[in-house]
Amino acid sequence: MSSIEKETESQVVIESADQEADRQLLRKVDLHLLPILTGLYLLSFLDRSNIGNAKLDGLAADLHLSPSGYNNALAVYFVAYVIFEIPANIILKRFDPQYWLPTLTLAWGVVSVAQGLITNQAGLFGIRFLLGATEAGLFPGVIYVFSVYYRRRERHWRVAVFFGGAALAGAFGGVLAYLIGLMDGVSGRRGWNWIFIIEGIITVVVSLAAYFIVPTWSTKAKFLTDIERERLLARLRADSDAANQEGFDWTFVRQAFTDHLVWAYAFLFHGFSFALYTLSLFLPTIIAGLGFAAWKAQLMSVPPNALAAFSIWGAAWASSRYKMRAPFIIGGGIVGIIGYVVLLATKTPGAQYAGVHLATAGVYTGNALLLSWPSENVSGQTKRAVAVAMQITIGDIGAIAGVLIYRPSFSAHLYRKPNIITIGYLVFAIAVTTYLWVWMARENRRRDCLMQQSKESLPDDEERVRLGDRAIDYRYQL
């Protein structure tokens, strides 16, 4: 064997060993991040959407809600969510996820228990505002934490697994609501009271355990050895800015607010969010409107949400395999539109229930894939933290519009007009996805040409931090 062949074989062995070490490292990170953070998000989505199950169990009648009272209560939640989201992520950047995320969970768990103690419409409005304020920081905070542990191409699969908790919350919530509803009359409380109380207590218990499980920043991760931590940070340095020790600077906040791509990510979620939250909050009512009893509608909300979870994970796997995000987001939007068309155009409960499955699978899948996009394509840690929060904030304005448009007056016709509006929102989201895809692909090609033509040296570390994703050697993930 020649010396060149020996050197080549040696290099292959080293690369294989490096790949195996990376896989072991990622498995360890996954084990310490995904179960607990997905669990917290499942509880978050359960505690915000179980009001839909409570409504079927008599909440509106018992609290003597006005005709628009239920919708206004839903909107109040998202108003608080929008107000507190960006401040919550700024606090996270200056604090520690190990304490911040469990504290948020504990706070909304207590608020959720309090939902089961309210006796009138005013109390419902106030408690929903507090729930939105306390839950606001979890989702953008977790997305940001992922960005300091995983390389860019590794994030979307983890975000998809994490977001799958929302779909599982819908499936799990339907069964749990049915079982808890059987407690109607226990200690003089209605079944809907117990839905809030018991699910809130579960959240409180998990939050206390989370203080010992949720990890801190990657630079101080205690579950990694010194060698593993250095390897993790080296991988991040080679891929993005995630391993940098970036101090807080308002300049990076301004960069986020003046970047057209950041706004596009936000408007993309705005379109999908309208469909996501109206589905999650009104699904039991829509199924009941097909002619099924309330208790059966609770259980029949399980299959569409279970299908959505599997759809999310399948699309995330395919997206990772083909290293493309945009086509699968567009595909999710198209499947969602088909589902709504089936729901609108057919007359039999079976066909309409099939439409519900397609709509849920498409909408949830598109949301799962788009939510990781800013964390992959926005560079500068502070800018990325603000961009993620902006995406959720502006996206949730779509949720506010949705819950106000799905008024009780439309329920007799399976929300026909609101469903048509939802199709329009999904078309808008598809258009924004196309804009992002085309612009970023063109910009990547432009930077490739500039680097081939330019004889200038690449920016140094300080300049790269200042430029972030505007640096000439930065490439967008499509």
Image (spheres, rainbow, N blue to C red):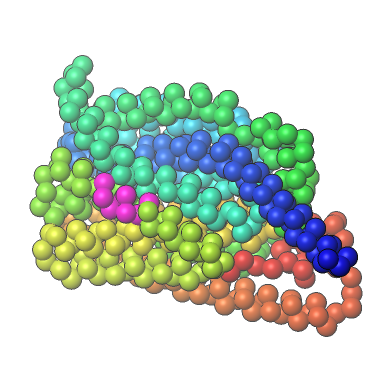
Q: Nearer the viewer, residue 127 or 188?
A: 188
Q: Is residue 404 visible?
A: no
Tell me if 139 is positioned left or right of 94 in this view.
Answer: left
Q: Is residue 344 left or right of residue 276?
A: left
Q: Main secondary structure of the magenta part?
A: helix
Q: Position of residue 23 (x, y in %)?
A: 63, 48
Specify the quadrant of the image occupied by residue 384.
bottom right
- Across the whole image, how many numbered discs are drawn on residues? 0
- The residue drawn where x is 53% and y is 41% is 34
Q: Position of residue 410 (x, y in %)?
A: 19, 58
Q: Residue drawn at (57%, 77%), measured in percent from left and top?
A: 438
Q: Which residues are magenta?
A: 302-309
Rendered residue at 49%/27% (across/down):
207
Is 27 drawn above or below residue 387 in the view shown?
Answer: above
Q: Is residue 318 magenta?
A: no
Residue 292 position in % (x across, y down): 11, 49
Q: Which residue, as the protein is rendered here, is positioned at the far top? A: 187
Q: Nearer the viewer, residue 458 or 100?
A: 458
> Visible in this render: residue 340?
yes
Q: Is residue 305 magenta?
A: yes
Looking at the rendering, in which quadrant would you find the C terminus?
Answer: bottom right
Residue at the spot 21% in from the left edge and 22% down from the top edge: 189
Whether residue 465 sits left or right of residue 426 in the image: it is right
Looking at the image, residue 3 sits to the left or right of residue 410; the answer is right
* Above or below, comparing residue 56 to residue 19 in the picture: above
Image location of residue 78, percent across then percent down: 42, 47
